[in-house]
Image (tube, helix red, strand yellow):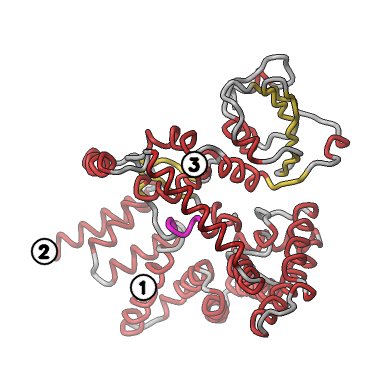
Amino acid sequence: MDFISPYINSDKKLHIRFEKLFALLSTCGFSGKIVVLSGAETFPVLVSNGSVWTDKPMNLLGNLPKATLFKVENSFDDGMKKGMKEYSAEEFLFSVILSMPRERVLEVMKPYATEFISIKPEAAKLMFLHEDLQPFVGQKRNEIFSNLKKSYRTIYFLLISQLAVILPSTPEEKAKIAEKLDKSDIFTEKAAAQEVAEKVETEKKKEEMSEEDEIKTFLNANERYTDVFSLFGLKGKFDDRVARREYIKIMQKIHPDKLVGVSPNTALRAKEFLQLAGECYELIRDPEVAEDIEHLMLKYGPIRNKNEYLKIKEYDSAMTKASALAKIGSYDAAAKVFDYIYKETKNPGALEQKNLALWKLAPKWNKLDKTDRFKDMRDDFVKISMVKELSFESMYILAEIYEYLEDVTDAVKILDTILKARPDDFKAAGMKKRILYYDKLKK
């Protein structure tokens, strides 16, 4: 973005690929006007708050001549939007890339063919990209070459929109992929012809798709939404303009008037999803409720509907009460409430608080109880650590539990973890020294 800054609101013109310029501006939260200077034609593309307005077809924007220049201004007159079509920034960029010539995209992707790619979690919120992301789900590293044939445009979009990063391959991996690459025809005219044939076949199937199949496809994609915000293409904050636009799209697609001739099961699914969408839309339209949901999702994870919101709100209230019980010394009662919350929500924070409350009761336990309870607490702490980082207080306790259970190796590992983060932690250093000293005496 730094190299673009001198060009904003100046007479200087940028010589850059359109999709790259748009991606750079969009990821930096730019609002303003991109003026396209293509031969004798000059026209604007308007950008503001994650939305894009243009009256030009994607095919034109994706096939701009290489000599095209651009001017950038950080403001525009709202009257310019009249007659223009509105898009979300992500869908706009993806549509432009879909319309670009194959060789132009592969020209950029070819140098990265022997590397790997890692997809950021935020990409899951792009419902329009759901099917395209299926090959990458559940993998931290994805070989680019093996996914290029069918997904090269998706990979390019993810990289250019900063929803994915390149993970360099090892020399051994690079050599193996390069060998496969040499035998591949992915960058040849033969592959291009095959892609055209496959595209024609796909379009033919779409034309033959029944109303029932279209609605099923729509429901299959949209029912997998992450939370009440992502259902409307939002990223954790409510924007009535964007949400209303997406809600209208849903209504237009599965309104009861559109369900004539579909099966009872599909009609019921559509009716239930439309009702859910309306409920979620009304829920987050209230600014206070939207802010409350954002706050709760940070603590407990995604909230998908009104019932989940009310349930999580109840649990959050219970967490507050349990914390108050712990503060006044009612550790047993607090532990029971935290345990209930964990069983209902699987929130690791509740399980950690339960163990912290139980630790206060540990001095009262007899030797037999301590052994059994400490084993349970150890297992709980390990379970928590697989989901979130343990607090330093929890790590001290876990180290003491390991020491009590005579697991010196794991006790020292925990203390080393603390000392790595806090080299001057005298408590951890003292515990480690004591544990190793007594272990040496026993041997």
Whether residue 327 appears in this view of the structure is: no
Residues 11 and 406: in front is 11
Crowding around mark 3 (Cα neighbors within 10 Å: few <14, some 14 to 19, many 20+) is some
- Residue at 37% across, 33% down: 111
Q: Residue at x 73, y 24 (%)?
A: 41
Q: Is residue 323 magenta?
A: no
Q: Give yes or no for contact between labels 1 and 3 (Cβ–Cβ under 8 Å).
A: no
Q: CA distance from mark 3 to mark 2?
A: 60 Å
Disc 1 residue type? Asp
Q: Residues within 10 Å of mark 1 (few under 14, many from 20)?
A: few
Q: Quadrant of residue 203?
A: bottom right
Residue with the mark numbered 1 = 379
Quadrant for the C terminus in the image = bottom left
CA separation, marks 2 and 1? 27 Å
Marks 1 and 3, how far apart at CA: 43 Å
Count of picture labels:
3
Magenta stretch bounds: 132-136
Q: Nearer the viewer, residue 190 or 109?
A: 190
| Residue 443: mark in rendering | 2
Q: Is residue 145 above or below residue 9?
A: below
Q: Which residue is mark 3?
A: 156
Disc 2 crowd rating (10 Å Cα; few below 14, some 14-19, many 20+) is: few
The quadrant holding residue 376 is bottom left
x, y percent for residue 116: 36, 44
